[in-house]
Amino acid sequence: MASLTVETWQCDACGKESVTKLQCCGGCKSVYYCDAKCQQRHWNAGHKNECKVMKVQKSQKKFETRTIKGQLQLEEYNLKDARKNHKRALKAAEEMKDELGIASSYHCIGRTYYRQGKLNEALKYYNKSLDIQLKKSGKDHPDVATSYNNVGSVYDDQGKKDKALKYLNKALDIEFDKLGKDHPDIAISYNNIAAIYAEQGKYDKAFEYYNKAFKIFKKRLGTSHSYTTNTLQSMISIKKYLARTKSL
């Protein structure tokens, strides 16, 4: 016959066990007591010095766990649950007063809205993240470049092409400084800018930026890489279009 396992709770002050859940410390929520007397005795015995540390440790673990879980769910396109976990991570970061953690959670929440096509909500959270990153990391930090790219992508999808170009070029300036002029990420930024120029009908500018991207991809990734071949195809398409329009 199978035996039943009964969960017990132990008082951190007196050590007594109970089959009913004990009250926890209202600060760290990590230790438990029989009653207020035990709690006061434990506080006076030293918990008052460790409570804040334990609270931060618990919040840090919660932040890391919820962030990882949210990222996995985002990759699986489980956007609703991903956002729930990133909002819980945000709450943990706020408990720790970790501003960069808060910025990271804002960024992740923004991504869930962006994937859903909720562009106004995505922009709101991307801008919240950007504001903190500018304040804490400085205007030339790579994470700031990422935020500029995110904001630019939203404006692009909203049809606000000039605003999109403004933010993508801000990102590009940082990437130049941090990555060097022939890094593949620079080429990706060139491609994104070229695509917007093409959508605006500015085909000469689009070709210029596609060509810049192509040269980097060819040098760094080789002629057979998909980035290289796709960029070359974009250039060929523009050339063909321009040739047709000039012949009319």
Image (tube, rainbow, N blue to C red):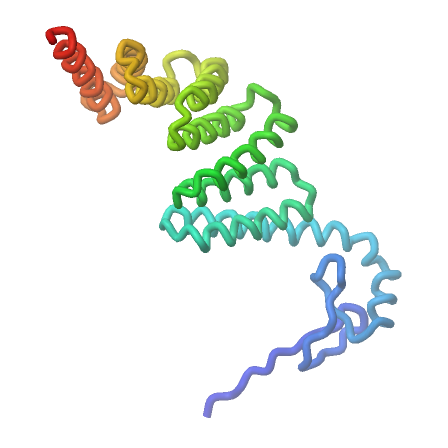
Q: Compare residues 237 and 5 and report the one nearer the observer.
A: 237
Q: Position of residue 15 (x, y in %)?
A: 76, 74
Q: Nearer the viewer, residue 151 or 77?
A: 151
Left or right: 52, with 99 as reference point: right
Give the residue furthest to the bottom.
Answer: 1
Residue drawn at the location 38% of the way across and 46% of the way down: 75
Instruction: Give left or right: position of 205 versus 17.
Output: left
Residue at the (38%, 18%) spot, across then down: 186
For residue 97, above or below residue 132: below
The residue furthest top is 246
Tell me if residue 108 comes above or below residue 164 in the rendering.
below
Query: Image height check: is 117 above or below 191?
Result: below
Q: Quadrant of the C terminus?
A: top left
- From this viewpoint, which residue is outermost toward the front? 248
Q: Quadrant of residue 117?
A: top left
Tell me the residue at 72%/57% (across/down): 28
Whether residue 219 appears in this view of the structure is: no
